[in-house]
Amino acid sequence: MNVSPNNSKQEKLQSILIIDDDKFIQKFISKTLNQNYLPVCASDGQEGITIAKKQLPDVILLDVEMPGMNGYEVCDALKQEKSTCNIPIIFLSGKTSTREKMLGYEAGAVDFLTKPCEKEELIAKLNIHSNQHTAHKALVTKAEDASQTALIAMIGNNELGQVIQFMESAYAITSFEQLSYRFLQVTNSLNLNCCLFFSTSEGNKFFSSKGNATPLEMELMPALQVAGNRFHDFGCRTQITYPRVSLLIKNMPINDMATYGRYKDLLPSLLGAADAKIKALDTEHALLQQSQSVSSSFQAVNSTLSDLSESLNDSQKNVIVSLTKMLTELEEKLHHMGLEEDQEVFLLKQAEDAINNTHDLSDQSDKLRESFHTITKLLTHLSERQQKILDMIFTRFDQTHADETIDDDSGSDIELF
């Protein structure tokens, strides 16, 4: 094998592999091409195949008649290899028949040169095919880049679609457990092993992609939340922190910076929505507790007023009955008490006045009972209004739809476009 010594130009020159058993032809072509190309020589077919697979030349000049593998066999072998199948092959032959050229074309060659060949013709054909090969490689590179860009865009759209679906399903979520389940569905679809921490009015809650959160995670995550930074990176682990929710990712793809950066852009949107939902659930829980407390207070006041009204009514009746009985007994016994007539009249008048006053009090009691009844009706009305407000606040989507949304595992196959 002979390689041109012009090493300073190797990176700029296109390489030409010459496969020919004739040393004179090797030297002639190498000298002809040395100024414009980087010639590399092989003396037989097997050596040529090895060099072609290793160095991937821009053009191959291949002799047809060689000992061992002939040119057609070498060409066929190179076209079977994925790495060398697109390299243009120009046959060199002392034969000029149409049949020889057809065999070369059938084997996969792009051109045919008759030995001995003219220098100008050789260089002209090499210029054409090497430039075409260079352009082809550039197009392949652009196509691969475009495919990769399209793939990244499709992946990004799928991930964005999952975030959007999570936000839509959040309206139907009624518990922290449902919220964590839907959140971890998204992270599981991204092949992320995560631990989720909720800071709620009911206390701290931990959820994990795999099993339960460890004691160290349950200690570390709230501590990092208190530290206040949005991102905490340590090794392949990253914690993203919001006021009411934190996400610890235990297998961030630090060796794939494009995916790593995409996750760091995507997950905060997911956490922001979860943080808002936790606040809403806390608010709803507080409203529900307050409503239950107010309803209980209304019922207690209503019951107390009703009991007081009944008690007052019974007391009034008992007083009137007692006074009437006393007056009857007094009238019967006055004649035997030896009182003067004016004294008897006075006592009877006093007793009648007392009874009349009692009847007046009874009338006032009736008015008081009516007032109590009005108050109890007002309390009942307020209690019903409170319940209506709660029903309006806690109105959910149809429960069947909500259950289907929460339990649906198809979120990992979302396509936004």
Image (cartoon, grey):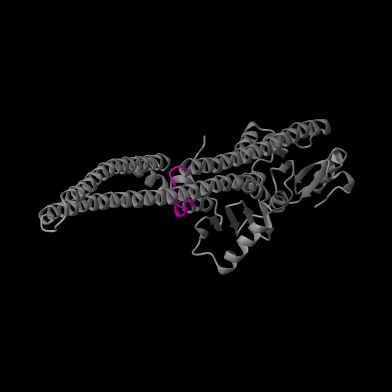
Residue 236, picture quadrant: bottom right
Front residue of this view, candidates 208 and 259: 208
> Is residue 56 toward the left or the right of residue 198 in the image?
right
- Residue 292, position in %: x, y? 39, 51
Front residue of this view, candidates 66 and 224: 224
> Is residue 285 toward the left or the right of residue 238 in the image?
left
Residue 210 among magenta residues = no
Q: Is residue 396 visible?
A: no
Question: Image point 49% across, 41% down: which residue?
Answer: 165
The answer to whether 122 is drawn above or below residue 24 in the figure is above
- Residue 340, position in %: x, y? 16, 52
The answer to whether 6 is drawn above or below residue 137 in the figure is below
Front residue of this view, candidates 58 and 246: 246
The answer to whether 157 is drawn above or below residue 237 in the figure is above
Front residue of this view, candidates 125 and 175: 175
Residue 374, picture quadrant: top left
Question: Image point 52% across, 49% down: which residue?
Answer: 278
- Residue 268, position in %: x, y? 61, 47
Q: Range of the magenta residues?
A: 171-179
- Residue 356, position in %: x, y? 22, 44
Most distant residue in the bottom direction? 215
> Is residue 109 toward the left or the right of residue 244 in the image?
right
Question: Image point 65% across, 50% down: which residue?
Answer: 260
Q: Is residue 105 visible?
A: yes
User: How many numbered markers are drawn?
Assistant: 0
